Image: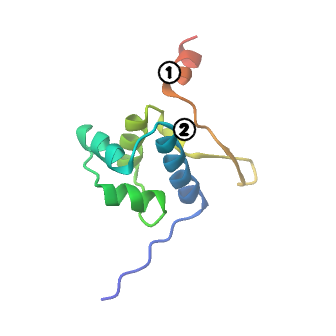
Amino acid sequence: MATRPIEIGPAGIRTARNIERLRLARGLSQQQLADRCTALGRPLTNAAVSRTERARRRCDVDDLVAIATALGVLPAALLPSWTAHGTVFHSAAQPLNRMQGALLG
């Protein structure tokens, strides 16, 4: 039985780029990010992080939440923002403490 190729659309690709961008901005290696996710209860390997960032592996909701937490941002910060016409125009990446401050006043 042949395996079906993984199809990752524009949102998945943009999310993968955001994960890598924020990981690098925090000075973390892929192994360090994987270790942080594992410590949070979502076991990820270095290879899984690498494949996720290269859009060769789907990032499910549980992965997204663990990765965001490990990076210190809300999960929405890893997702692309969309216009009314479905075009990606920017990401909502903001540090968690800024988001909390905005929400709490």
The residue furthest right is 85
Residue 74: x and y in percent read 48, 33
The residue furthest bottom is 1
Relative depth, front residue between 99 and 34: 34
Residue matched to label 2: 77
Please, what secondary structure does the residue beneath circle 2 have? helix
Residue 89: x and y in percent read 72, 48
Callout 1: few (<14), some (14-19), or many (20+) C-alpha neighbours within 10 Å?
few
Where 50 falls versus 78 (above or below)?
below
Residue 44: x and y in percent read 29, 52
For residue 81, which quarter of the picture?
top right
- The label shown at residue 97 is 1
**What's the distance in space between the residues labelled 1 and 2, CA to CA?**
12 Å
Among the two numbered marks 1 and 2 on one chain, the one whose residue lies closer to the N terminus: 2
Is residue 20 left or right of 105 when viewed as pictured? left
* Residue at 36% from the left image edge and 82% from the top image edge: 3
Please, what secondary structure does the residue beneath circle 1 have? helix
Looking at the rendered structure, the kind of residue marked 2 is Ala
- Whether residue 61 appears in this view of the structure is yes
Callout 2: few (<14), some (14-19), or many (20+) C-alpha neighbours within 10 Å?
many
* Residue at 49% from the left image edge and 63% from the top image edge: 55
